[in-house]
Amino acid sequence: MALFFSFCLSSIIFLQYYYDLQKKEKPLIEPTIIPAKAIKIADLGLHSFASAFMWLYTIQKMADSPTKLPELIETVNELDPKFSYPYAFSALLLPAFGFDKEAVKIAKRGIESADPDWRIPYYLATAYHIFFKDRKNAAFYFDLAARTPNADEVAKRVASRYGLLGTTREQTKAIWQSIYDTSEDEIIKERAENYLVHIEILELLEKAVLIYKQKFGTDPLKLEDLITAKIIREIPSSPLELNFYTENGRILVH
Amino acid sequence: MIEIKNLSKTYGKQKVVDDLSLTIPTGTIFGFLGPNGAGKTTAMKILVGINRPDTGQITIEGKDPSMASTREIIGFMPEEPGSYNQLTGLELIKFVNNLFNKNKQSSVDELENLLKKVGIYEARHKKIKNYSKGMKQRLGFAQALVNNPTYLFLDEPLEGLDPIGRREIKIILEELKKQGKTIFFNSHILADVENICDQIGIIHRGKLIYSGSVDGFREDKPLEEKFVEVIKSIS
Amino acid sequence: MNTLFVIAKNTFQQAIRDKILYGIILFAFLFIGSTIILSSLAIEENIFIIRTFGLAGIYVFGLIITIFLGASLIYEEVEKRTTYIMLAKPVTRTSLLIGKFLGLLSAVALTTLMMAIAYIAVIYSSGGGIDYPAIIAVGLQIMEMALLITILMLFSIFTTPLASTIYTIIILYIGHLLSLILEYASKTGGIAKTVLITIYYLAPNLEKFNIRNLVAHNIPLSWQEVTFSLGYALIYIAFIFYITRLVFNRKDL
């Protein structure tokens, strides 16, 4: 009896383990997205709950199925247009997955429909500034964010100085720093931190190139020259997975 | 006195009770007999005011039993009484007692005495779902007596009881008769009936075929033998 | 009047002693408690997640309890012949129905309030303060359940518990989709339009009791609308109850 019981138990555990091993080798199946209209018919009026549930589902599927992100987020929005955070999240994260147009479309819809949330125009403005290099729209949405009720003071300050004080890079740093300081979202914080570290590395390499020019009277031909000249020990890697190189004394990325 | 005049009841196309007329004197035990499906239970449900007749009139002490106030003096035990399984025996009796406005028992002791009388006092705190069939039958009998009714209607009161239980219930019925109660009961166990009934009525296919004394019907034969003979001759 | 409350108390006792009910309540508590863990998956907006999931949980489990307890309400009484015991006493059929309704509503209200207390404790411990609007949402939910109980009672008079459950679930969905039905009606014509509009006005509009989406977004409640919903519930309950009474009075037991 005990033998039979042990055999069954160990077989069950082994089969589950084997199944999981097999599953890892198979390509992931793209998530099926049930239309929001169909969910609304079935959810007994619990639209906010359905939207929140889809949002949790979207976050879990983000890493595995990034191509479905815009569709998933649109479903979340359609179920509960007032749920603000997904719009803000989309504005900042979708461009990184290559969905620039979708990010703008979703964020603009959020500004119209969602609960007043300064993060939506603020993150949209950030996207315009950093990804689309559109200073005009960036200024517009930063201003909108600053005027949104309950806007964070840090964000208000950055928004009010945008285009007026500092270089583009200083403004970019300030924007990412404000996002890092005001967000509790680990993904967004990590993104902001990566940009800040990237800018820091850029500035470090620019200083190193200046030191090299002062020492040798000429710009280094490649970044390895800085190591040879013992100005830096190694070429730091960007958390944005971009490679640095130098040309005519400038630090560029590819 | 219970008076039934031209009582008829139809279910669908079937006339289940057909022009029934009876008078049951006060202080008697009246056995209402008949084969299965004769219309006994249907008639009884109308007598106690659960259902309404299609035609005819019933009065108990001159009042219509369909009026709630008349039912203060009635006790009814249905056939195979179901119950509220989550309640204990005592809780059920308390519940039933509280449904009365006038004739309720005034204390828990009186209710417990009632349970003693029917033989389920020991199980009074047990949930009804744990009662045997016989215990449920006795509980059904107890709830019919809660208001010390003047008129008692019992549908197959001896069903499911062992011989000792049947004897105990028959003794109670005799005691109630001595107290002047009028008892109207259905049964198809004729051997039990002939000992206690003052009068009987026999119904077959909804029609009353005999009403009168037990001896007047059986003519020196055992009641059951005479009953089968009569029913077969009609069929 | 007295018999009404005696029957209500008996019905309440029967309902709350059902062990299956405890199982459902336990699952409800587990669900509400788990919203804290679920909210941590959300990345910000954790109070919003707890609110939406918590209120949805109270609603869904409240529905399960109502349908589970109510589907066999009258049917079992007739099957077990306990109606005979009561109706042979000085109890009218109307007071039997009202007593059963009040008893079951009390049981449903109690379980709903228990879930609501668990929810409020979870919100409070997560830093969301005391969610007063949620209390109004739960109150309106209890009115919705009261309406469903009358519908269940009506069905249970003439059909089995399974069929009562199915019919009530259909009405539940129709009740939440009436705006969609009106939308379809505006796009159709002829008899279809007439039928759809009739359904729209006659079917119980259960969305009137749904303010969960407003509560989740901290949108202020309109007291006029809440009062209107209460009035609608009371009138509709009285209407269904009247039909139930007519059907039950004509039924031979």
Image: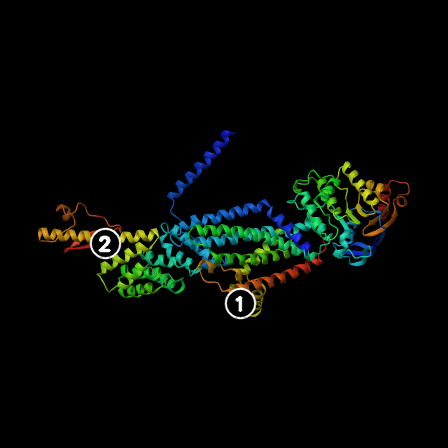
Chain under callout 1: C
In the rendered image, residues at marks 1 and 2 fall on the same chain: no
Of all residues, the one furthest to the bottom in this rendering is C190
Disc on res. A172:
none
Q: Is residue C244 left or right of residue A194?
A: right
Q: Can residue A214 be seen in this view?
A: yes
Callout 1–callout 2 Cβ contact below 8 Å = no
The quadrant the C terminus of chain A occupies is bottom left
The spot of residue C168 in percent (x, y) is: 59, 56
Quarter of the image where one finds residue A118: bottom left
Disc on res. C185:
1
Of circles 1 and 2, which is in front? 2
Question: Secondary structure beneath disc 1?
Answer: helix
The spot of residue B24 in percent (x, y) is: 85, 51
- How many C-alpha atoms fall within 10 Å of the one at disc 1: few (<14), some, or many (≥20)? some
Q: Is residue B13 visible?
A: no
Q: Distance between the Cα atoms at labels 1 and 2?
A: 59 Å
Q: In this view, does C78 lie to the left or right of A192?
A: right
Residue plotted at (68% across, 43% down):
B89
Q: Is residue B153 left or right of residue C187?
A: right
Looking at the rendered structure, the kind of residue marked 2 is Ile
Question: Secondary structure beneath disc 2?
Answer: helix
The spot of residue B149 in percent (x, y) is: 78, 49
The spot of residue A29 in percent (x, y) is: 40, 49
Front-lying residue, B148 or C97: B148
Mark 2 — residue? Answer: A199
Chain under callout 2: A
Front-lying residue, A90 or A152: A152
Looking at the rendered structure, the kind of residue marked 1 is Ala
